[in-house]
Image (spheres, rainbow, N blue to C red):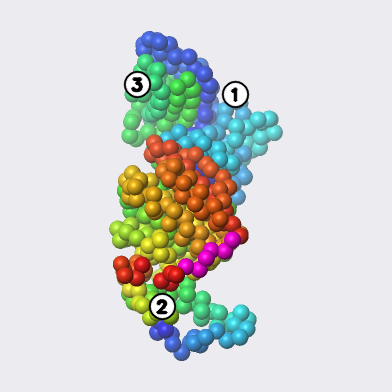
Amino acid sequence: VHRLRSVDNLFVVVQEFKDYQFKENKEDALKDLEDLVKKLPWTDPLKVWELNNSLKKKKTKRKKHNLQSPASREKLNDGGEEGGADQNNANDQEDCAQNPVAVEPAGGQDTEKPQGVTSRNGVEEEEDNEQSDVKAEVQASSESGTKVGDSQTGEGEAKVLRFRVTCNRAGDKHSFTSNEAARDFGGAVQEHFHWKADMTNFDVEVLLNIHNNEVVVGIALTEESLHRRNITHFGPTTLRSTLAYGMLRLCDPQPTDIIVDPMCGTGAIPIEGAAEWPYCYHIAGDNSPQAVKRAANNICSLLRKNESKDSSTALGIPLDIIQWDICNLPLRTGSVDIVVTDMPFGKRIGSKKKNWDLYPACLMEMGRICTPGTGRAVLLTQDKKCFAKALSRVGHIWRRAQTVWVNVGGLHAAVYLLRRTWERAEERRSFW
Amino acid sequence: KLGHPSELPPEPVPNYEGDEEFLRRLHHVLLEVEVLEGALQCPDSGRRFPISKGVPNMLLTEDEA
């Protein structure tokens, strides 16, 4: 589960309240939350959390193994717990559309239970045996560069755990703030478990996610949001790697496909592409020298990460970066399988006015380089009006196949999957 | 052309797909050698595009576009 690439955070759900009625008065509302602590089914989620920790400690640089074991382990079924995936910015739609692999609420869980129990025993055995290949391998921590697990937990429950409560609250009608909720809930947790409260050096992070009338109490399984992996040099509008991954998946890349991001910025999309789809060839380009420089730096960081200790040279990655103009791409007509890019929204980069000319020109040029019939494009933009208009002008080369709504830093954006029609692009009077 | 002039023929020979030695050299030049400083030259126009720190600059000038 940790290896799901389009997930920002993982947590195990302790209890979910679909329609929680908050008392109007702040004190009462908060008191209710405090009382809740005693009533919640903590035992199994905590077991999952422990499991997760022991897995994190075993992180090694070995090759990937199959995902089946951890998936089944997460599905412990007492009291109806589920494993949940969470995105910080309420990217719900994106998650549903792009990530069907996400851990599902396990219905009919009886069959899962014995499996869950035995694999736990398996883990304990493996902890003793260093040589054994650990099936479940947490690469997420290594991708994001965070340190392994929490070395403070030590071995087992005898030690007093440190915890913190993080409250994420969204909605207009609450009588309390997230800080207040976190504080009071935390107080109750402390009384109930006798854990020590520590905001920075904690073992357990209890999550209190409140979205209008929906309350979810969970225990975090990831330390740092996974949305910044693979990028070291950020630009003004660097795309989250998780979103980049989702967009790439939408293209359904096949081995030997040529994938081009003609407005790559810091290179988030091609880098994610080269990391996860190494049998495709990725080409990144941008007209801005700063963007190109940052992208090149990010690529170098990735190369350094891949350096094997035995050989002196790093293993290459199938990715190149070029400085170019999207309206005059130095690529042959019909030579590219996939175009995937984050188009300038017209807010931080470019302007809405410029978009009126840019978007149609982009679509034409992308249509030219893309292979008729089998080619596809996945484009992210917030300037939906402009995009729709531009698209209507190029109906002879692009057809809209799917639209996914996403939330990008609070902006309502859309990801469009386009299919290249069979019609050949006219040979332009181009410079090339 | 990249300091490997003698290794590659000026044009692909017929049935080059089966010529393993040629393919290996071609693979090397295309995918294993990276030009850090140099240029790409258009075979038709002769226009040179500089490469700096591994990144080619293929922006056109005002007149060319």
Residue A213 higher or lower than A117, as above or below = above
Q: Magenta residues?
A: A423-428
Vertical comparison of B6 with B23: above or below: below
Judge whether residue A86 can be spotted in this image.
yes
Q: Residue at x 54, y 79 (%)?
A: B24
Q: Are marks 1 and 3 on the same chain?
A: yes
Q: Earlier in the sequence, mark 1 or mark 3?
A: 1
Query: Where in the figure is residue A16, as x and y percent of width and height?
Result: 53, 24
> Could you tell me which secondary element the residue under label 3 belongs to?
loop
Where does the image place residue A3, in percent across and percent down from the top left?
Answer: 52, 46
Residue to which mark 2 is pinned: B42
CB atoms of marks 1 and 2 within 8 Å: no
The overriding secondary structure of the stretch rendered in magenta is: loop
The answer to whether marks 2 and 3 sit on the same chain is: no
Q: Is B9 on the left-hand or right-hand side of A169?
A: right
Please check the rendered image and state whether residue A16 is part of the magenta-colored stretch, yes or no: no
Res. A79 mark:
1
The answer to whether the residue labelled 1 contacts the one labelled 3, judged by CB atoms less than 8 Å apart, is no
* Residue lying at the far bottom of the rendered structure: B6
Label 2: state its secondary structure: loop
